[in-house]
Amino acid sequence: MQAKRLFAGLLSAVMLMTLLSVGASAAEYTPPALPDAFQGDGLYITATPFELEDGWYVNTTGYSNLAFGDGLIMVVRNEREVDENGYYTGATIYRAGFADKTGRVVLDFADWENPPALRDLLTGNRNFSEGLCAYYDHETGLYGYLNTRGEPVTPAIYDYANDFRDGVAWVRLPGSDRLQVINTSGQVLFEVEREDNCVYSDFGDGLAPYRGYSVDGEYFEGYIDKQGHIGIDLTDTGLSPYHEGTYFLFSDGYAVVEDYRGSKSYPSYVIIDTRGSEVASVDPAAPVYAEIAGETFHDGLIQVSLIDTSVWNNDRMALVNIRGEQVYTAPSRVEDGLRSDAVYYSGHGVFISTMPYAIYDIRGGTVIPDAETLQKLLGGAAPSYMFLSTFADGLNLLWGTGVPTCILEVHQGTYTGGGKVYNAATGQITGGGSTPTDPETPTEPAGGTPSSWAVENVNTAVEAGIVPETLQSAYTQATTRAEFCALAVELYETVMGTEITERATFSDTTDVNVEKMAGLGVVNGVGDGKFDPSASLTREEAATMLSRLANVMEKPLTAGTASFADNASISSWASEAVGQVQASGIMNGIEGNQFAPSDPYTREQSIVTMLRLYDFVK
């Protein structure tokens, strides 16, 4: 929350300067189109013009929480109120709606007798989360929840209602001194006393920061579970899930808590798992100390501010993994003026700097440069101001003067489209016929489309939502062990309808998909605490993982004995699984009735067998 407040404050300050600076000439200026994509190191961001239907607009005058939620962003519309005779009353009606990333208004409350205009409508304080959004009913003066079709899921009966997270939300009934936790159907899971010193926050991985009484009447500080019982009791341990109003939430199976043990004059933190066990500390060597600047882990990383007590004003942002290791450090104030408190990391491998606005990746520096640099590249001449919302669902809204309003979307890999692309490494815009000397438009690399035998099944798997976007290319290349885990996670969570919360870690990767599959027991390491995530997956390894995956989904494969000509080459630990995948029709042999257990397994083979397993277990 602390990071969000800092980010919101900076947004407000910059917006105020913008309103004072932009004149009529800027309003009349038509900005040039942005490049179609911005290429970073291992990722790229596409920029798509965001054009709403007539009369609708995104309110950006108070945008502390302006962001996409469930792929939707709040939009508003002003209408002149008329009486029953059609005469203008002098009043303006503000209507709320939600648009998708294409600019299509998919939810419009104009037909409601009492439109559920959101409280603080002009500050954009509500977004969809987990398919639901809280609305404020002006007739009752209370809150309810509606779904993405605009249908009330719960009536407006609460005087307090926060956003859904982890399938639940905190609410309070009018005049009550008790807090309730409800699920997405509005069912009350538990309720507790709202004492003066009661502190609570959002759930994650089934746990929420909490100080107060459990449903069993026990007072504690730590994390409460979804039944209202003590999940993790940190009372009297010297650990706390709070720091100066920031609540540290669980995500990816881990949370940071503040460590008050000892006599340190600066904040110290440890990382705990969902059992409350300490797994690492976050404590850089003096004279530097870390202050947690994010609420949760994103992609196994959490943002911290590194404060150097030996150098004035030399704070810098860093990212720390679940082992407490510093894996990325941003430039400092002293080095180039980038303020650490003006940086916000929300996952997807990118973070935003707000002074000035720019987007960086955690591997290779700037992806989208500041507005001034962009204008020079695009040949613009008008005053230029650029603003960004926070990334959510991999989406971000860019707007301002001197730049067009666009939807930014993060993708992993290398841009292979035919449009213009800004390359962060060279600082040049190329492609799309931008200049006669530009290199040819990038073409799909070899293996960019599936082989003829696999096309239909690969397309079906993509449509079923079981193929991560990062694996929808280079189909003929060998699948890595980590990539197969990503496919397995997508399949499991799609079929089971729930996120995997179990985790097991390795020393050579923080890939959350690997940790999820290891947590379920689907994959093992290669020894010495390592997983070897980049190694090519072999056919017998694939068979073993597919068999174990079916087991954890409680749909074990058909028992059978492998009948390949090279049975003797199959490792003993994989023999049973190979027999199962053959008997179940999940994997077959290659030419000459060979299984070729040590051969690498390609992406398209992996996707096709995942589709077969999907059909087997669903």
Image (tube, grey):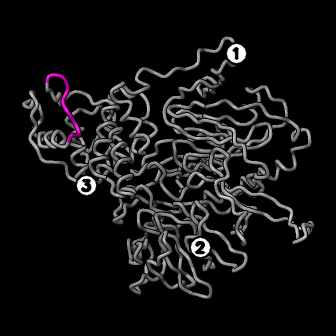
> Mark 1–mark 3 contact, CB under 8 Å?
no
Q: Is residue 242 visible?
A: yes
Residue 435 disc label: 1
Task: Say above or below: 45 vs 394.
Answer: above
Residue beneath label 3, please? 552
| In-front residue for pair 406/615 | 615
Mark 1 residue element = loop
Could you tell which of marks 1 and 3 lies nearer the N-terminus? 1
Could you tell which of marks 2 and 3 lies nearer the N-terminus? 2
Instruction: Determine the residue located farthest toward the left in the rendered image.
Output: 568
Mark 3 residue element = helix
Query: What's drawn in magenta, residue-wise?
Result: 585-592
Left or right: where 209 falls relative to 99: left
Q: CA distance from mark 1 to mark 2?
A: 54 Å
Residue beneath label 2, please? 161
On the image, the x and y values in percent for residue 479 come to 33, 32
Q: Amino acid at mark 1?
A: Thr
Mark 2 residue element = strand
Q: Which residue sits at x=41%, y=87%?
A: 217
Q: Which residue sits at x=23%, y=40%?
A: 586
Classed neighbour count for the residue bearing mark 3: other residues with Cα under 10 Å, few (<14), some (14–19), many (≥20):
few
Q: Amino acid at mark 3?
A: Val
On the image, the x and y values in percent for residue 365 come to 58, 34
Q: Main secondary structure of the magenta part?
A: loop
